[in-house]
Image (spheres, rainbow, N blue to C red):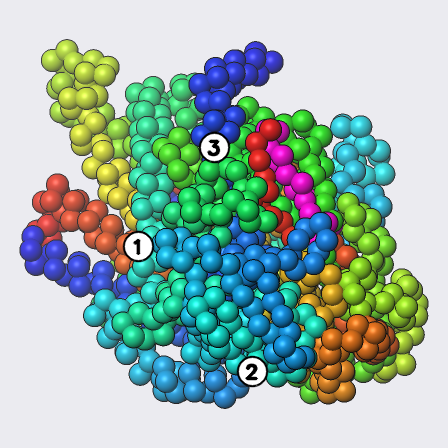
């Protein structure tokens, strides 16, 4: 188990750093950080000075490794736009994004799992068909459009929810719903397939023979086995949402990491974008890694193989 | 991989008829195909169908109401914030969606399939490298990187297509890699090897043709995803540059007036929804038709 | 139908549970800003949002009276010119900083030295440094400004561009730190900063020690919260649902529609802001830039239908602009060459300049997207192949000399004098200038370097005419200024166009 974990962990880190390298190269080929850093009123001499001072005149690979070196010391550089350390920015924007990601996963769980279970328990009935159609619809609906429509209907026409911001938990209801819905199709399908397989297995037949029916059967026997893959996909989805809610945050004017990312791109704030790419990749590999470990722990075939 | 075995049996002439018959009985497939046909026709015939040039502005007739809200038949869907005919923009927007979706998926397909075939066929180190690339692609914050790339390179239709294509190929890779591994074991490939055919021609002549239906299914889904990705980029202001009409851009532009002229947001949003749902249904249909056992 | 009624019932119940008018009861005004405020220190930002914030948290030496639009003493008691290059200002004895300490001459001297110092990196160093030679304390309540040359607008500069800071405010461990006051500026104004989340939220509260005989003493609302909401449609939704009570600079379409619903007020106010397109006349962006040819610049002027833009898109009190200043400003004249909409003439001029087939152009802008799209359309109609780069801010590429055409706007700090807008846009020591015209630069500089009103006026007139003749700009419009206010708020916009948020009060 330990060796497996170490192997997977090392691979995950390698992935995160490769992505950071790609981002670094892309961003550095396309922009001139020195002139960005010199600011609005600078002349050419100032820019040259800064280029020397901060080492932008060195070869790219040297710059990358020196960036990597400071990352290991916890120094992620300064944001050009905000003129403050990127770490501070990320720390400031993270809690909101965490709350949004967490609550949207909650929405996913509350919608997708009961729906998937209902569909699996009543295969090829109306319920099953409705559940599958919902999944198809949720997959096709543009996230940002849904957000805009939700604000229009549920915050203005009927002022039930706040329009924007993230001050209370009440503010999170609409954005969490919109963001959570995007994960519903995959989680629901997986729940349904998992349950269908388990229901067809021998020991469920045994349990049925013993007289378990309906919810009791589901809770005691089927659910636990069917949910194993669901748990790991949820972990991956959470990792994705921690960095991926660019659109939702923008629609609901929530000032989390997603909006920081958008603003940094449009503001040409290269160090911040670079850092965010790295952090998002790292979060994603971390959660995938956790999901892998979870799977391995629950399923000895992986752990030993 | 029962699916693949079934499909391998289906290569003969008779099975083609079976395929068509099954497709014609599949409601989802028919609906999807019909909607896509209509939208593609709209896109192709946009220059003929559109009553106006999509950039022709008439500032004196801004935000005109659509017919059902009391507007005139001159502008059946009303006009936007610059007085441009909304129907014409919607039609040309279909062109953009279809072109971007299709081309980006082609790029993704080429990348994903090549890597998948390489990894699956050669195995060993090549396969390790390919898996590593896959892990990287999965972990990439695609929308963020896509935004950054489009913004830094400068937005244009070509750039958007390339960026989306380059960032979306993981499904192609996964499926072709697994399928190639299977195909490699099959007898006729072993036979070709024995006959001394070189590896490339084995891939080209024996492996790829057997993967077509898998790739086609994935391709369909990826077109849908690429269309949504383009719309999201345009919505965030770093996609298709104005005044080219893209449905995502139209939603973003209509957002300012959404509480008072809600159709400006509702119409392109619904069009997008309809197109993507049709594409996904067609994908589901293709999957069911070519590999009925994989349904659950 | 049934669903609709159910939803309405739910909405009604919840509306009772969460009264929309709660803000008045809490005596907390929530205002929305469209752009992000990065610092509470007004010396480090030039956006209008920071001007508004600066008037709340800072008292400068002078204050522009909204009635007369003339500078009146604020932290100063009075002033005297001992000669045309020496200004002596006496301070009021009762001005205090938010930390409770009194304002002294030493603080004023420190503030101005910081503003013009290189290490201070303030955004007003160039502007103040143009005229300020040195400053010294005469005694505890008197300071003397020694000027490089006579400067007619000096009291305006002492009103807006120069915030007062406590001695040593920018020193952290003995090192000059420009962002030392970023998060919680220690100002002298009627409101103090309670909490600041950059780019997101500012919380202000009335400053207890604020003197009651100040021209700004009408400030009555206990707390002001400023939320940054980039999207005007989101702002409209917030105002209609009671989440925000005050917004400014709202597009006319949105504000009018909101007003029509009766769920909030729409107030149109005057504005000093002008919008223009600057063209690269000197080949800074590209030695072969077509815009170097005056005929091309004139063609780009003829190609645009300003009347259509202002009456249909900007609306309100907006009017077409032909000058490099707002015509109500002193020194501005509308007796200039105008370029009435004439696409045929534009095409002819382009052909004459050798661009009968048009040319490729990147056009940069950071505000008023619909107007930019309209402009792109007009230019395309005469054959120029324009692509719009709509960004968050054009200032970096602009100052780096990379742009051939960009949209700019200036509110002149709401100062009714051409000297408030023209120097920063035509004197060649400023990075944003693309004219390359040394004579014009000298002319504008000399116009501000005399107290003789007639001479100033003549020089500015000459400059304005020259700019129009050379078509260095494509002047576009005089702005309108729209506010959305909650129904329980009273706010009257002063004539000069500068929002003074401290004048807001509950009904």
Residue ID for mark 3: C27
- Give residue A91's mark: 1
Which is in the foreground here, disc 2 or disc 1?
2
Does dot 3 land on a helix, a strand or a loop? loop
| Residue B206 percent across, percent down from the top left | 39, 62
CA separation in Å, label 1 and label 3: 31 Å
Q: Give the magenta range.
A: C480-496
In depth, the one of C195 and A290 nearer the eye is C195
Dot 2 lies on which element?
A: strand
Q: Residue at coordinates 27% horizontally, 64% vertically from top-left?
A: A15
- Give yes or no for residue C492 being in the magenta stretch: yes
- In this rendering, the answer to whether C59 lies above or below B255 is below
Q: Position of residue C45 (x, y in %)?
A: 52, 63
Q: Residue at x 42, y 78 (%)?
A: C119
**Are the two marked residues, 2 and 1, in contact with CB atoms closer than 8 angstroms?**
no
Choose mark 3 or mark 2, whichever is in front: 2
Q: Is residue C260 left or right of residue C79?
A: right
Tell me the mark number nearer the camera, choosing from 1 and 3: 3
Say above or below: A131 vs A289. above
**Residue C353, position as x, y percentages in the image:** 86, 82
Q: Residue at x 39, y 87 (%)?
A: A52
Q: List x then y, in percent, for residue C374.
A: 76, 56
């Amino acid at each position: 188990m330990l060796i497996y974990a170490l192997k997977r962990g090392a691979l995950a880190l390698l992935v995160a750093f490769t992505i950071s390298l790609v981002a670094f190269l892309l961003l550095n080929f396309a922009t001139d950080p020195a002139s960005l850093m010199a600011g609005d009123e600078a002349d050419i001499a100032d820019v040259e000075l800064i280029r020397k001072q901060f080492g932008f005149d060195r070869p790219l690979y040297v710059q990358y490794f020196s960036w990597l070196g400071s990352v290991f010391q916890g120094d992620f550089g300064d944001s050009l736009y905000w003129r403050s350390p990127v770490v501070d920015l990320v720390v400031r924007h993270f809690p909101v994004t965490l709350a949004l990601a967490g609550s949207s996963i909650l929405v996913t769980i509350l919608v997708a799992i009961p729906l998937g279970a209902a569909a699996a328990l009543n295969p090829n009935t109306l319920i099953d068909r409705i559940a599958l159609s919902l999944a198809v619809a949720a997959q096709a609906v543009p996230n940002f459009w849904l957000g805009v429509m939700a604000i229009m209907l549920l915050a203005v026409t009927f002022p039930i929810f706040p329009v924007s911001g993230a001050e209370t938990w009440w503010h999170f209801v609409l954005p969490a719903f919109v963001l959570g819905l995007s994960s519903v199709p995959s989680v629901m399908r997986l729940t349904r397939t998992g349950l269908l397989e388990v229901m067809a297995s021998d020991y469920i037949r045994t349990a049925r023979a013993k007289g378990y029916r309906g919810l009791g059967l589901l809770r005691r026997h089927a659910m636990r086995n069917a949910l194993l893959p669901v748990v790991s996909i949820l972990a991956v989805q959470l990792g994705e949402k921690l960095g991926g809610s660019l659109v939702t945050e923008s629609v609901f004017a929530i000032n989390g990491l997603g909006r920081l990312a958008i603003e940094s791109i449009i503001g040409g704030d290269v160090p911040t974008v670079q850092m965010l790419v790295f952090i998002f990749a790292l979060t994603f590999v971390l959660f995938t890694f956790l999901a892998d470990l979870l799977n391995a722990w629950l399923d000895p075939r992986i752990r030993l193989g | 991989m029962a699916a693949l075995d079934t499909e391998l049996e289906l290569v003969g002439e008779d099975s083609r008829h079976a395929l068509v018959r099954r497709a014609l009985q599949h409601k989802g497939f028919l609906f999807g195909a019909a909607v896509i046909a209509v939208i593609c026709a709209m896109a192709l015939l946009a220059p003929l169908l559109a009553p106006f040039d999509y950039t022709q502005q008439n500032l004196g007739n801004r935000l005109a109401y659509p017919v059902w809200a009391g507007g005139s038949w001159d502008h059946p869907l009303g006009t936007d914030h610059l007085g441009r005919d909304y129907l014409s923009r919607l039609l040309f927007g279909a062109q953009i969606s279809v072109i971007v979706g299709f081309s980006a998926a082609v790029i993704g397909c080429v990348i994903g399939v090549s890597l998948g075939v390489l990894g699956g066929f050669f195995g060993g180190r090549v396969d390790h490298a390919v898996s590593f690339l896959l892990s990287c692609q999965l972990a990439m914050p695609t929308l963020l990187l896509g935004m950054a790339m489009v913004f830094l390179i400068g937005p244009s239709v070509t750039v958007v297509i390339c960026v989306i294509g380059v960032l979306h190929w993981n499904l192609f890779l996964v499926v072709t890699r697994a399928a190639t591994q299977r195909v490699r074991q099959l007898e006729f490939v072993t036979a070709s090897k024995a006959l001394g055919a070189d590896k490339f021609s084995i891939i080209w002549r024996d492996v790829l043709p057997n993967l077509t239906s898998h790739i086609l299914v994935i391709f369909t889904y990826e077109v849908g995803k690429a269309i949504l990705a383009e719309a999201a980029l345009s919505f965030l202001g770093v996609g298709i540059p104005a005044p080219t009409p893209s449905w995502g851009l139209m939603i973003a532009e209509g957002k300012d007036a959404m509480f008072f002229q809600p159709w400006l947001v509702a119409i392109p949003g619904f069009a997008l929804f309809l197109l993507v749902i049709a594409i996904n249904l067609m994908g589901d249909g293709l999957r069911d038709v070519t590999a009925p056992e994989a349904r659950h | 139908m049934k669903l609709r009624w159910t939803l309405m019932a739910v909405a009604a119940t919840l509306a009772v549970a969460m009264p929309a008018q709660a803000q008045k009861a809490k005596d907390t005004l929530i205002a929305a800003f469209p752009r992000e405020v990065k610092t509470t220190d007004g010396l480090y930002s030039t956006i209008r949002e920071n001007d508004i914030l600066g008037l709340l948290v800072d008292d400068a030496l002078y204050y522009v009276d909204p009635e007369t639009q003339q500078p009146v003493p604020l932290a100063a008691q009075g002033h005297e010119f001992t000669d045309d290059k020496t200004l002596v200002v006496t301070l009021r004895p009762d001005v205090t900083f938010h930390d409770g300490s009194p304002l002294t001459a030493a603080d004023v001297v420190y503030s101005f030295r910081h503003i013009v110092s290189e290490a201070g990196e303030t955004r007003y160093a160039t502007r103040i440094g143009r005229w300020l030679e040195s400053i010294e304390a005469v005694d505890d309540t008197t300071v003397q400004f020694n000027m490089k040359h006579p400067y007619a607008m000096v009291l305006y500069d002492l009103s807006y561009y120069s915030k007062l800071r406590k001695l040593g405010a920018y020193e952290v461990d003995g090192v000059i730190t420009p962002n030392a006051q970023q998060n919680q500026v220690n100002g002298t104004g009627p409101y103090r900063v309670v909490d600041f989340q950059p780019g997101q939220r500012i919380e202000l509260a009335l400053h207890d020690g604020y003197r009651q005989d100040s021209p700004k003493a009408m400030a009555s609302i206990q707390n002001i919260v400023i939320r940054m909401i980039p999207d005007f449609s989101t702002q409209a939704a917030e105002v209609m649902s009671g989440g925000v009570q005050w917004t400014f600079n709202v597009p006319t379409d949105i504000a009018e529609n909101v007003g029509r619903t009766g769920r909030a007020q729409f107030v149109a106010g005057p504005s000093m802001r002008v919008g223009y397109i600057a063209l690269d006349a000197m080949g800074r962006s590209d030695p072969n830039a077509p815009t170097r040819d005056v005929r091309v610049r004139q063609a780009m002027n003829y190609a645009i239908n300003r009347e259509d833009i202002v009456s249909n898109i900007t609306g309100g009190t907006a009017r077409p602009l032909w000058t490099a200043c707002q015509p109500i400003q002193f020194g501005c004249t509308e007796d200039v060459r105008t370029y009435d909409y004439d696409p045929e003439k534009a095409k002819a001029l382009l052909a004459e300049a050798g661009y009968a087939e048009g040319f490729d152009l990147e056009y940069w802008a950071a505000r008023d997207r619909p107007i930019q799209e309209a402009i792109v359309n007009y230019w395309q109609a005469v054959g120029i192949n324009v692509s719009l780069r709509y960004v968050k801010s054009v200032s970096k590429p602009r100052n780096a000399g990379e742009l051939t055409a960009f949209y700019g706007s200036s509110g002149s700090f709401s100062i009714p004098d051409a000297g408030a807008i023209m120097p920063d846009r035509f004197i060649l020591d400023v990075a944003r200038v693309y004219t390359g015209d040394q004579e014009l630069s000298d002319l504008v500089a000399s116009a501000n370097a005399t107290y003789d009103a007639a001479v100033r006026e003549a020089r500015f007139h000459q400059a304005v005419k020259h700019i129009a003749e050379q078509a260095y700009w494509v002047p576009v419009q005089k702005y309108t200024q729209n506010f959305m206010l909650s129904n329980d708020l009273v706010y009257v916009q002063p004539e000069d166009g500068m929002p003074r948020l401290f004048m807001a009060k509950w009904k």
